[in-house]
Amino acid sequence: MPVCIHALHCLGRDATVPTRPFGDAKPILELVLNSDASRSHFGGAQALSATRYGARFPRYVGAFLGVNQSASEAHPGQLLSVLAELSVPLTQAIHLNKESAATLQIVLDDLIANLY
């Protein structure tokens, strides 16, 4: 996901990435805001996870070298910061799984609850 975050930052909201195995272009915003889409693109790693306080984008942990962390952000709040720069509102829908939908607000709620 780091490449996706940087692509969003540099290319804007309409940035796309090729999908596997066919190479069709998929909007990055759809990949990072939809767990089902991210799971299929990032080889099983999901970009959003429900937490006690809302939801979060997973963070890269250097000690987990053998774990698929392709859907992780390098810094807490990194993707949320880029989304704010792109004027993506906190009312933007996110999908945690097929049965659960929410808004980007719960990602901010989790970040605030876990400031340290």
Image: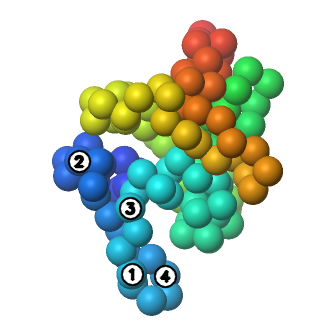
| Mark earlier in primary sequence (4, 2) | 2
Residue 90 seen anywhere in this rendered image of the structure: yes
Dot 4 and dot 2 residues touching (CB under 8 Å): no
- The quadrant in which residue 109 appears is top right
Q: Which mark is residue 24?
A: 1
Question: Marks 4 and 1, how far apart in space?
Answer: 8 Å
Q: Which mark is residue 27?
A: 3
Task: Find numbered disc 3 in the image and state the secondary structure of the residue it sits on.
Answer: strand
| Mark earlier in primary sequence (2, 3) | 2
Task: Find numbered disc 1 in the image and state the secondary structure of the residue it sits on.
Answer: loop
Amino acid type of the residue tagged 3 in the rendering: Pro
Task: Find numbered disc 2 in the image and state the secondary structure of the residue it sits on.
Answer: loop
| Mark earlier in primary sequence (3, 4) | 4
Residue visible at 36% across and 74% down? 25
Residue visible at 20% across and 52% down? 11
Question: Marks 4 and 2, how far apart in space?
Answer: 22 Å
Which of 23/61 is in front? 23
Q: Mark 2 points at which residue?
A: 12
| Mark earlier in primary sequence (2, 1) | 2
The chosen color scheme is rainbow
Q: Name the residue under label 4.
A: 20
Q: How crowded is mark 2: few (under 14 residues within 10 Å), some or many (20 or more)?
A: some
Q: Is residue 103 left or right of residue 19?
A: right
Residue 14: image location, x then y, percent: 27, 55
